[in-house]
């Protein structure tokens, strides 16, 4: 069963009542950023949890707050309300230590009108005093409150049991599952392509994700740094599923001061490491910044395939000059991934966005490519004839043969006498030849060296 067909459990409540801590506790790992600062969660965060034998799609939402629709907090609330609308069960959280606030009462009243099953959670109810304080929550009219402490793990087992009991029967939770075609293979398909969207703040990463999904999934706006956590969603193109991660903007390390932003950047780097293909989003109106190149070098060091996405292309005046300046800068500064694909579009209007996923699929195929040993060594012999290995300590290196040891990214092993002494300039010659001959633009190409001992050296 795909995550789309699982029963949906939504965690809702006002800011700073411990929703993200509860989310992490139920999914079994630290997936959502947690901080004492109110309003850390801005976008819906999704994960899968196994609760008493039932797999569920768990959604952590932004804190419910009264605000005008056109403000940031208004957009956050709208996102949380749309999550509640699709829920099979809502976990409405209050802070037992703070007691019932007017905001709790207001949103409890709103929830009762949504016609969704609700389980009332009195969080931060550590010890007997907390349990007594939780009883006050009866006044909300949402049934018996369940007292627990997400931070300390108290009452979590009872909560899992309550959730499992209140979920719709397993047959109903599969209501959106497509019927299997006759004769269709029963084997589990290969996992989705893992794609991360990376870039500096305000480059348009979340707007791009919304455009690809065709819905306002991420909070967007003119304010820089709206996305604070890495948000994973799934979409499908004609080739299959794609697990897409939108990340927080990455600034220069010297400018990252707040602990919260450090956690956001760490989550972005972790998402990059888990990805197979990375889309580096650049604001085309600003051109390539040094920080964009630093991110590009990080992508190369991690061995990931990359697509450069030039957003806000509709706002560029001289497109030919801008494209040439950007391509020249990339060619010089990201030489290790020469030929990197570049896609221009406007995420805001949607113009040109349809070209992005085909470019991602193409570079993904290159990243997975393999070259037969015979074909590789025929090219290798020609490369040696065209440009002999250099002299090292007055003696010429004897390079014997080459083989591809793995893909993802393409990695080759070169054998020869004293091969480990091969200068970097000759390694670049070979890598560039491999990339050009076997059509591997835009992906890192690794060349490993292994020397062989000369049996007559000691004699």
Image: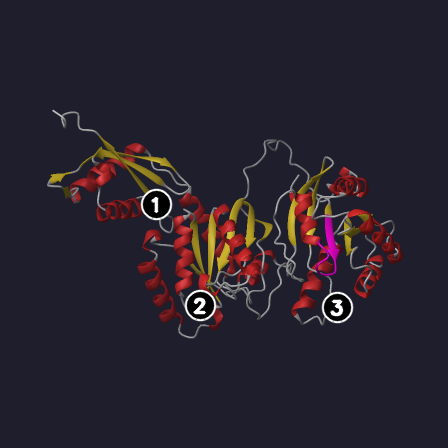
Q: Is residue 189 above or below residue 335?
A: above
Mark 2 and mark 3 lie on one chain; the one further toward the N terminus is 3
Of 230 and 156, which appears nearest the observer? 156
Mark 1 and mark 2 lie on one chain; the one further toward the N terminus is 2
Q: Badges 2 and 3: C-beta atoms under 8 Å apart?
A: no
Element type at mark 3: loop
Q: Is residue 374 left or right of residue 357?
A: left
Q: Mark 2 = which residue?
A: 284
Quarter of the image that includes the N terminus: top right
Quick check: can you spot residue 4?
no
Magenta-tinted stretch: 9-18
Element type at mark 1: loop
CA gap, disc 2 and disc 3: 36 Å
Q: Mark 1 = which residue?
A: 445
Q: Per the image, is 16 magenta?
A: yes
Q: Mark 3 = which residue?
A: 66
């Amino acid at each position: 069963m795909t995550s789309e067909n699982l029963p949906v459990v939504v965690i809702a409540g006002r800011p700073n009542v411990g929703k993200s801590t509860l989310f992490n506790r139920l999914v079994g790992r630290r997936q959502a950023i947690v901080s004492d600062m109110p309003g850390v969660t801005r976008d819906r965060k999704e994960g899968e949890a196994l609760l008493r034998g039932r797999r569920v799609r768990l959604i952590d939402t932004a804190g419910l707050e009264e605000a005008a629709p056109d403000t940031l907090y208004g957009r956050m609330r709208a996102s949380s309300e749309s999550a509640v609308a699709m829920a099979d069960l809502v976990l409405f959280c209050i802070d037992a230590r703070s007691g019932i606030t007017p905001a709790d009462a207001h949103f409890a009243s709103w929830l009762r009108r949504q016609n969704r099953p609700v389980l009332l959670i009195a969080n931060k109810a550590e010890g007997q005093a907390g349990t007594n304080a939780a009883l006050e929550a009866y006044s909300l009219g949402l049934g018996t409150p369940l007292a627990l402490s997400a931070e300390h793990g108290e009452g979590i087992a009872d909560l899992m049991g309550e959730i499992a009991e209140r979920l719709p029967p397993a047959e109903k939770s599969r209501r959106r599952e497509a019927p299997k075609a006759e004769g269709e293979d029963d084997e589990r398909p290969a996992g989705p392509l893992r794609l991360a969207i990376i870039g500096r703040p305000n480059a348009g990463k979340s707007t791009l994700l919304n455009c690809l999904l065709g819905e306002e999934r991420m909070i967007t706006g003119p304010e820089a740094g709206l996305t604070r956590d890495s948000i994973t969603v799934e979409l499908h193109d004609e080739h299959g599923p794609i697990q897409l991660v939108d990340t927080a903007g990455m600034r220069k390390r010297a400018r990252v001061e707040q602990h919260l932003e450090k956690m956001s950047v760490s989550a972005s780097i972790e998402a990059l490491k888990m990805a197979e293909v990375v889309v580096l989003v650049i604001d085309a109106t600003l051109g390539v910044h040094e920080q964009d190149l630093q991110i590009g070098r990080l992508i190369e060091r991690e061995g990931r395939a990359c697509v450069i996405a030039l957003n806000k292309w509709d706002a560029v005046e001289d497109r030919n000059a801008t494209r040439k300046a950007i391509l020249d800068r990339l060619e010089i500064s990201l030489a290790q991934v020469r030929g990197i694909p570049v896609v221009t579009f406007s995420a805001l209007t949607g113009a040109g966005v349809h070209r992005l996923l085909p470019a991602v699929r193409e570079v993904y195929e290159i990243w997975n490519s393999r070259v037969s040993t015979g074909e590789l060594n025929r090219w290798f012999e020609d490369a040696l004839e065209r440009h002999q290995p250099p002299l090292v300590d007055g003696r010429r290196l004897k390079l014997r043969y080459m083989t591809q040891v793995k893909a993802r990214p393409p990695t080759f092993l070169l054998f020869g006498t004293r091969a480990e002494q091969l200068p970097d300039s000759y390694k670049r010659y070979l890598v560039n030849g491999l990339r050009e001959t076997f059509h591997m633009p835009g992906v890192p190409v690794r060349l490993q060296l292994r020397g062989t001992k000369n049996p007559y050296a000691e004699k």
